[in-house]
Image: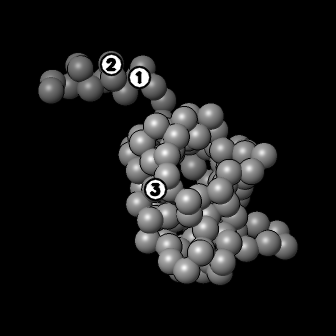
Amino acid sequence: MDIRHQAVVGAARPERGLSVAPLRGRTGLKLSGEVSLATRADWERALERALREGGRMYRLELSDVTFVDVAGAGALAAAAQTLQDGRRLVLHEPPHTLCRLLDLFWPDLRAIEVTS
């Protein structure tokens, strides 16, 4: 790939961030922004925290997340697949793209619950 091509690709889509903060009064995290290649490490750290800290239920408030790419959905599914003993991740108001990806690729994943 030459430098001219990189500049065009980079200019076509500005990088967006992902912010992660603890939920007030509940066990979980509030996330905002987007999950993409640029924010994948932050997303994976948030999922690791959910697995480490969560009890029976760990809430991820996603109402301010605008987009989750396929790799981000895959990381979520992989994290959920490691949960045992009825533990689950509760996704509150996830973006439609994430719900669609979970339905398409992981339709029987019971460790994820979606609420609105």
7, above or below 70, in the image? above
Going by the image, does 81 lie left or right of 34?
Answer: left
Going by the image, does 9 lie left or right of 95?
Answer: left
Q: Secondary structure at mark 1?
A: helix
**Which of the 4 quarters of the picture holds residue 59?**
bottom right
Q: Position of residue 36 (x, y in %)?
A: 45, 42
Q: Residues within 10 Å of mark 3 (few under 14, many from 20)?
A: some
Q: Is residue 8 visible?
A: yes
Q: Is residue 45 visible?
A: no
Tag 1 residue: 11
Q: Secondary structure at mark 2?
A: helix
7, above or below 42, in the image? above
Q: Are marks 3 and 1 in contact (CB under 8 Å)?
A: no
Q: Residues within 10 Å of mark 2 (few under 14, many from 20)?
A: few
Closest to the observer, 98 or 38: 98
Q: Position of residue 95 (x, y in %)?
A: 64, 38
Which numbered dot is residue 77? 3
Going by the image, does 17 lie left or right of 59?
Answer: left
Q: CA distance from mark 3 to mark 1?
A: 31 Å
Question: Mark 3 is on which residue type?
Answer: Ala
Mark toward the viewer: 3 or 1: 3
Task: Give the residue displayed 42% in from the left and 42% down from the top.
Answer: 105
Q: Give the mark nearest the N terminus, 3 or 1.
A: 1
Tag 2 residue: 8
Q: Give the mark nearest the N terminus, 3 or 2.
A: 2
Q: Are marks 2 and 1 in contact (CB under 8 Å)?
A: yes
Task: Give the residue displayed 73% in from the left and 74% down from the top.
Answer: 27
Q: Residues within 10 Å of mark 1 (few under 14, many from 20)?
A: few
Residue occupying the far front of the picture = 108
Q: CA distance from mark 2 to mark 1?
A: 5 Å
